[in-house]
């Protein structure tokens, strides 16, 4: 099976812009989680989607949002970008969630100038 | 909410030595504990995981132990090799809540010198 894929792999944006990142889970996986990785804060949970519904959300401002499509692909959006949003954004998929193994994608590296 | 502490932040060993990384968690309801290895510029990859109904799990040179009473779990790597050099993350989650959320430790940078 193909692994988790993410597009784009790299992005450069300026403050105030918005960005949309995409994640395609492993075939058959219905749970997609998003994480932000920074040197200072480490790996932090953003949100999780299952069957097009957000099941859980981390402690991030409302500028961070996401959605999931009927084919389980997921997108996350960050509006009004701030310098501190520069990070590696990782998505991970699992079959149904709830304590199952999560497989990570390669990430999208976002740089906000 | 859940908090996971991980020590040490850096660990340097000689090839062939053993390496031990320790994590503690705060939420006694956590019952799933994976360990991920992340090489520079690459995605985190699961190397081993343990559930709360098991005290120890081993896979070749890698083992994980769990002490539910003390709320800590450890990763043991024996006969380390240079290719083991990477950042290792522990994580915890509550697997019976109907949703998926991993809380990660801050990572341990392991350097294995030949």
Image (cartoon, rainbow, N blue to C red):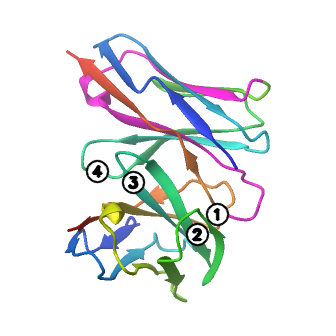
| Residue under label 2 | A48
Closer to us: mark 2 or mark 1? 2
Instruction: Check residue A37 in the rendering and tell me which mark sits there, or answer none.
Output: 3
Label 3 or label 2, whichever lies nearer to me, is 3
Q: Which label is found at residue A97?
A: 1
Q: Quadrant of residue A107?
A: bottom left
Is the C-beta separation of discs 4 and 3 under 8 Å?
A: no
* Marked residue chain, label 1: A
Which mark is in front, 2 or 4? 2
Q: Chain of mark 4?
A: B
Task: Read off the magenta span.
Answer: B70-99
Secondary structure at badge 3 equals strand
Is A72 located above or below residue A99 in the figure?
A: below
A59 relative to A13 in the view: left or right: right
Q: Are marks 3 and 2 on the same chain?
A: yes
Same-subunit check for callouts 2 and 1: yes
């Amino acid at each position: 099976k193909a692994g988790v894929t993410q597009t784009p792999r790299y992005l450069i944006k300026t403050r105030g812009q918005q960005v949309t990142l995409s994640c395609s889970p492993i075939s058959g996986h219905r749970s997609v989680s998003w994480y932000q990785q920074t040197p200072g804060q480490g790996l932090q949970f953003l949100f999780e989607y299952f069957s097009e519904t957000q099941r859980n959300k981390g402690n991030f401002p409302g500028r961070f949002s996401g959605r999931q499509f009927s084919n389980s692909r997921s997108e996350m959006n960050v509006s009004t970008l701030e310098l501190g949003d520069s990070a590696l954004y990782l998505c991970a998929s699992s079959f149904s969630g709830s304590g199952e193994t999560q497989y990570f994608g390669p990430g999208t590296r976002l740089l906000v100038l | 909410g859940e908090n996971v502490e991980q020590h040490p932040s850096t660990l340097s060993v000689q090839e062939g030595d053993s390496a031990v990384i320790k994590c503690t968690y705060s939420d006694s309801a956590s019952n799933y504990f994976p360990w991920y290895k992340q090489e520079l510029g690459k995605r985190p990859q699961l190397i081993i995981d343990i559930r709360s109904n098991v005290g120890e799990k081993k896979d070749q040179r890698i083992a994980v132990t769990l002490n539910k009473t003390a709320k800590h779990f450890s990763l043991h790597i024996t006969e380390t090799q240079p290719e083991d050099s990477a950042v290792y993350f522990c994580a915890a989650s509550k697997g019976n809540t109907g949703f998926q959320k991993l809380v990660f430790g801050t990572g341990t940078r392991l350097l294995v010198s030949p």
